[in-house]
Amino acid sequence: MEGELPGAAAAASGPALEPFPLVTGETEIGPEPDPAAFGALLQQSSGQRVLHVPRESYFSLVAALKNAGYEMCADLCAVDYLASPNRRLPEGVSPGRFEVVVNLLSLCRAARIRVRVQVGESDPVVDSIFPLYSGTEAMEREAFDLFGIHFRGHPDLTRILMPEDWEGHPLRKDFGIGRVPVRFKEAPGRR
């Protein structure tokens, strides 16, 4: 038939392919962890699975997800919900002022999962997942720099965008508008 790839008809009529085992390198991928074992609640949001995990279980849940084949941390960011303390959360999840959001990908499963952990204003600390995903080093530093969330166990939790002597965290909702001073550098001299 016109527009069909060569051999497509033969492939379609051939024997069904057996699913291959989930293996990455030398390690076979285990089953996905039970969210309830970590005190986490699972919900669907826009067709994506979302896990709401208590702060105390955050690291161990992410480690279990990595062992289950979620080999890539695509994103880690923070959100300040100062203006939305009564936002919609699943029953049983207590809102914190801040939230750390982690998006994990499993390339071998062709799956994505989002992990959300509530972080209180009085104690803005969560465990670093840098030992699991080394690519989160800069992402955790950015959340620290702009929101003031501390990542326990991070190897270099220093500012990444703002100058070292900067006071405050500019993406917090209570950071004064217009408070950001403009800093000019001297113009280079004649060459």
Image (spheres, grey):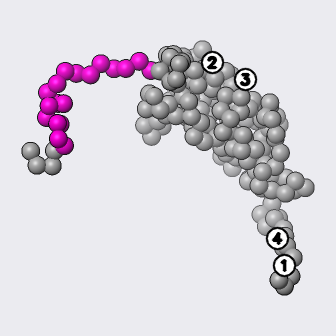
Q: Amino acid at mark 2?
A: Phe
Which one is closest to the eye, mark 4 or mark 1? 1
In primary-sequence order, the first of circles 2 and 3 is 2
Q: Judging from the image, what secondary structure is the residue with disc 1 in? A: loop
Which residue corresponds to the image point at 80% horizontal and 35% vertical from the top-left?
155
Q: Is residue 33 magenta?
A: no
- Residue that carries the numbered disc 4 in the rendered image: 182
Q: CA distance from mark 4 to mark 1?
A: 18 Å
Crowding at mark 1 (Cα within 10 Å: few <14, some 14-19, many 20+): few
- Residue that carries the numbered disc 1 in the rendered image: 188
Which residue, as the protein is rendered here, is positioned at the far left?
A: 1
Q: Judging from the image, what secondary structure is the residue with disc 2 in? A: helix
Q: CA distance from mark 1 to mark 2?
A: 57 Å
47 left or right of 10 in image: right
Inspect this view and state whether residue 5 appears.
yes
Which residue corresponds to the image point at 9% horizontal and 44% vertical from the top-left?
1
In primary-sequence order, the first of circles 2 and 4 is 2
101 left or right of 43 in image: right
Labels 1 & 3 near each other (Cβ < 8 A): no
Quadrant assignment, res 46: top left
Labels 4 & 1 near each other (Cβ < 8 A): no
In primary-sequence order, the first of circles 4 and 1 is 4
- The span picked out in magenta is 5-22
Q: CA distance from mark 4 to mark 3?
A: 40 Å
Q: Amino acid at mark 3?
A: Glu
- Residue that carries the numbered disc 3 in the rendered image: 56
- Residue that carries the numbered disc 2 in the rendered image: 38
Where is residue 153 shown, x and y percent of the image?
Answer: 80, 30
- Look at the image and tell me in which quarter the C terminus lies: bottom right
